[in-house]
Amino acid sequence: MTDKNVAIRLTGLTRTFGSVTAVDGVDLEIAEGEFFSMLGPSGSGKTTVLRLIAGFEQPTSGTVSLFGEDVTSTPPFDRDVNTVFQDYALFPHMTVLDNVAYGLRVRGVGRRERRERARAALASVRLDHVGDRKPTQLSGGQRQRVALARATVVEPKVLLLDEPLGALDMKLREQMQVELKQIQRDLGITFIFVTHDQEEALTLSDRIAVFNAGRIEQLGTPFELYEKPSSRFVADFVGTSNLFDVETSREVLGRPGHHSLRPEKLVVGPAASTEPGTRSVTGSVVEAIYLGSGVRLVIDLDSGTRVTALQQNTGGRVHESHGDRVHVTWREADVVVLDDAPIGEQNDTPSRTIRAVGAR
């Protein structure tokens, strides 16, 4: 991307706490208007990177640039960014409208203008009818949208979201994911979203950086991360994968190296496939777990390897059950080669070789 399209640029960003390296030399560019997610387990460094962008933490080394300006030493209140936290941090004694207008009040905006802008911000999240209520009179999803309105009313160039949906129940989270993406499209500003929920990141993001041990393990679109994981960590953390080491790859897949195969790529049935480009093995069903939208099958292959398959609920189909003898089939093209295999164990047969694209 060209410099004029870069909202955030991190260069050699490092943050240590005593002997612990929380962020380890991260290089990253985030585009203007992008919905960008930082995904990873607890302790992976993603939240520390967000705090470094916000100015709540100072880097041990490296720089943070905002729209071409070095803001590494700039205090948080002088950076053109705003943050939405998981706990919303709304003032309980203020009305919703006054909560939203608070940032404008701090900036010295006149009463009339700040109330007009606060009403417009509430309308943008479809809550213009609750301005006179207190936060305690709202649902969790409504409070989340109020927090978004308060963060966006000051018109920041970048909005930082630190696991803002973490306190919501599953159904409300799913609803808010749709609304959050729509709000971002309507506002047209850069969203940087931190989460440990891989499904949430896949749902919302234009691009995702997967963090591990303070570094970016892989950077790409949701499709790239899910379909083309570059390492065992990404294949295992982003979604569910059947992972094969050197020995099981030779026994089950018929090829050397380290590989992954997604459960939904496996077809389970009473007969082996004869289609070109497919491979079938036999095994026994250990568990059949009904999920509503499908059935998860845990299968012990005759080779001694256990795999998981996901069969879609197509309506009226009788799925396999415990103890059934089955054939497990997959397309050779769906087997992903993992680049973190030791040298000398890479696959030498025709297949997709996935290259890492993350910053190091």
Image (cartoon, rainbow, N blue to C red):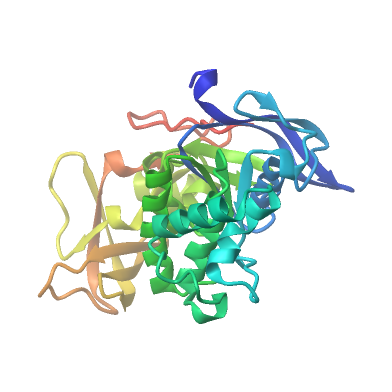
Residue in the picture at 62% in, 68% down = 90
Residue in the picture at 51% in, 76% down = 133
Total labels drawn: 0
Front one among 211 and 53: 53
Q: Position of residue 24 (x, y in %)?
A: 73, 38
Q: Is residue 316 visible?
A: yes
Q: Position of residue 183 (x, y in %)?
A: 40, 51
Where residue 326 sits, quadrant-wise, is: bottom left
Position of 201 with respect to 24 (left or right) is: left
Q: Is residue 195 visible?
A: no
Residue in the picture at 30% in, 74% down = 291
Residue in the picture at 44% in, 54% down = 120
Q: In the displayed orientation, state which residue is furthest to the left.
A: 316
Q: Is residue 31 above or below residue 43?
A: above
Front one among 137 and 75: 137
Q: In the displayed orientation, state which residue is furthest to the right.
A: 18
Front one among 106 and 144: 106
Position of 55 with respect to 86 (left or right) is: right
Q: Position of residue 175 (x, y in %)?
A: 37, 66
Position of 9 with respect to 72 (left or right) is: left
In the rendered image, the quadrant that contains the C terminus is top right
Q: Is residue 360 above or below residue 299?
A: above
Where residue 331 sits, quadrant-wise, is: top left
Front one among 180 and 82: 82
